[in-house]
Amino acid sequence: MNQIYALSARTTLLVCIFIALFSFGACSMDNHEDELRNAPQITASALPAPNYSLLQVKQKFRASITGNKTMEQVKEDVVFEGVVVANDISGNLYQTLIIRNIASVAGAEDDQCISLGIKSSQLYPYFPLGQRIRINLKHLYIGNNSKTPKVGRPYYTSRGNLRLGPMFLEDVATNIALVDKPNPQAPELTPRDFTNEKGLDWLASRNNKTFLNNPMLVTVRGNVAEVQGSEKNTATTGLLSGKTEPLPKLFAPQALYDAGFAVDRHLVLSHPEATSNLNISLRTSVRNPIAFTPIPEGETTYTGVLTYFDAWQLQLRTVQDIRR
């Protein structure tokens, strides 16, 4: 009988420990969510009224945006508003927000986006998708990073080259303000659709590679060349790491990292009625959830931020941007 009581006591103790651990974990998750909800305000409480549209901003600073690694400091109040359509939630877009003009018709001249660089490792709790923000460019710098229009601050690379990098986090407190609450169904979150014949022909035209079409939130559809035919089981060796990528192939295995700590895959866009296929770069940073995701073999739909340097380049925001 004593053994039965002892066993019962031990069982009760184990159950109590389990309940305590579960409760602690639940409280920890709740506390984390509360921390995000109650995070200290890092943005400005108020800014001057908007006096520019995003299109007008790009046109005003066209010389710096379109030059060769150029930038300039803004000396006056240049205030505009936009909606956050991409952030750093997965880590694939590092220290970056993509802002889109409000209430534009997709593809119209005023349907503009710009990149904001902010020196912080976690922007998404403060700037979720669908959050409307107001930006005052005064004292910040505007120019381009690899031909992509960007707002930030200059920095020197390890080789002593001056480049446009992220603004300081303290700049956010003086130059960026939240407007209303985030709207996850904001119409600005609807990407431009390039999955049809007209879309492929548009991307194929060199005339569309202008600063006014860079960056963009888009949807495309195609096959990744590295998992087609014999390429599927042919592993590549990284030029910098000297290591061979694992199989089945992932979007960005660490073995294939380049100087920018990312991996380029070749996404072939096609449509039965298009005049020709189009090959664009699907670029993914290493060490984020997308990087470790197996590449779909069949035709797949991808949504993300499209930019160009010499050719079009697509960066996904999250794993959810991949749809069969």
Image (spheres, rainbow, N blue to C red):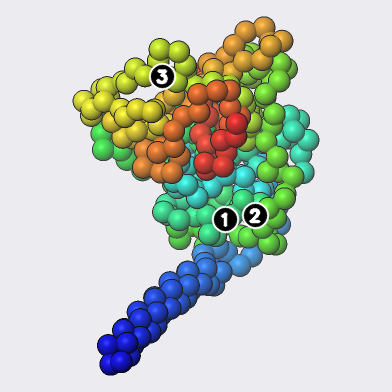
Q: Earlier in the sequence, mark 1 or mark 3?
A: 1
Residue position marked by numbered label 1 in the rendering: 127
Q: Earlier in the sequence, mark 2 or mark 3?
A: 2
| Residue 232 - label | 3
Tag 1: residue type?
Answer: Phe
Label pair 2/1, CB-CB below 8 angstroms: yes
Tag 3: residue type?
Answer: Lys
Label pair 2/3, CB-CB below 8 angstroms: no
Q: Residue furthest top?
A: 275
Pinpoint residue 53: horizontal percent, then vertical percent. 71, 43
* Disc 1 to disc 3, C-alpha distance: 38 Å
Pinpoint residue 127: horizontal percent, then vertical percent. 57, 55
Q: Residue at x 71, y 16 (%)?
A: 197
Mark 3 element type: helix
Q: Residue at x 44, y 37 (%)?
A: 293
Residue 104, can we see it?
yes
Tag 2: residue type?
Answer: Gln
Residue in the foreground of this view, choosing between 171 and 208: 208
Q: Is residue 196 left or right of residue 13?
A: right
Q: Residue at x 56, y 51 (%)?
A: 138
| Residue 131 - label | 2
Question: Given this view, does label 1 or label 3 mark the residue nearer the observer?
Answer: 3
Residue in the foreground of this view, choosing between 65 and 312: 312
Q: Is residue 20 left or right of residue 242?
A: right
